[in-house]
Amino acid sequence: MFETNIRLISMLGLLTIVVIISLLLDYLRILRRPVRLGLSVAILGIITGFILTLNAVLPTNHFYGPVFSESRTSLKLVALTFDDGPYPPYTGQILDVLKERQVPATFFVLGQNAAKHPDIIRRIAAEGHQLGNHTYNHVDLLKLDRQAIITEIAQTNKVIADAVGYAPHVVRPPHGFRDAVVMDVMAEYQLKVVEWSVSSRDWVNPGAEVIAERILGKVQNGSVILLHDGDGIAAALSRDQTVAATRIIIDKLVARGYQFVTVDEILKVSEE
């Protein structure tokens, strides 16, 4: 695990300077004997930057701190998660599907959207689903300073608590992006960072059948499935395809013998 409060963007900036200077020294034929040291350092800097960035965006990586993306279990359990809502009418339609099929899910909501639709937040909780924090404005946390990250988390917690009487204890950073400072803030607020193990890229609306097949082809015991009931803050694109895909995914996974649980429940299985 990477333990430092230096921001990823600062490290990448420093590495860029090192790479440029090293390439310049190599171009000027300085530090070329007995090996091309300047070129070697530049290549090493590029590789290091790539690794640091990759570890910040991969949903299953623990380099900057512990994240949860799936459960290693022999039990046929999966967790449905939805990001970016609430977003009427699609969040309500998804809730209708879940209610009809008696399936629980976890909704990582945006504070700004939740503030506009507290009634939907209350419905999510009342129907037995779990609420998670997905920040207030859906901004890339890697680009924010520590205080701005705290504000994103705290504002969303307050909006949810005002609606249902409690704040969530799970969080999903926008796009899953995090570095050491992001993880430190989450730990400060006692929030478990939840990523995913199966994604369909449903936000680009490739078609309900495509969304479903991308999920069904990858799902396994303990999978955390990523879907989107919302469209960020813009709230412009339709989520009809995700609603239709949700029906297909649930019906086919139930036919395979899977049981749906919330993130909390699948976390408990993982911890046990």
Image (cartoon, rainbow, N blue to C red):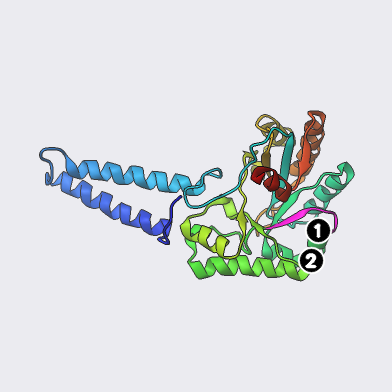
Residue 227's quadrant in the figure?
top right
Q: Is residue 63 above or below residue 159?
A: above
Which element carries disc 1, helix, strand or loop?
helix
Task: Report the residue marked by disc 2.
Answer: 164
Q: Is residue 213 left or right of residue 103?
A: left
Q: Residue at x 63, y 64 (%)?
A: 136
Q: Is residue 253 visible?
A: yes
Q: Is residue 187 left or right of residue 157?
A: left
**At label 1, which amino acid type do we have?**
Ala
Q: Is residue 101 above or below residue 17?
A: above
View extreme (front): residue: 272
Quick check: marks 2 and 1 in contact, CB under 8 Å?
Answer: yes
Task: Report the residue marked by disc 1.
Answer: 125
Neighbours of disc 2 within 10 Å: few (<14), some (14-19), many (20+): some
Residue 201's quadrant in the figure?
top right
x, y (%) of residue 101? 87, 41
Q: Is residue 121 above or below residue 80?
A: below
Q: Is residue 110 above or below residue 194?
A: below
Q: Is residue 205 visible?
A: no
Which residues, given as a range, are shown in magenta?
Answer: 125-132
x, y (%) of residue 225? 68, 41
Which element carries disc 2, helix, strand or loop?
helix
x, y (%) of residue 111? 68, 64
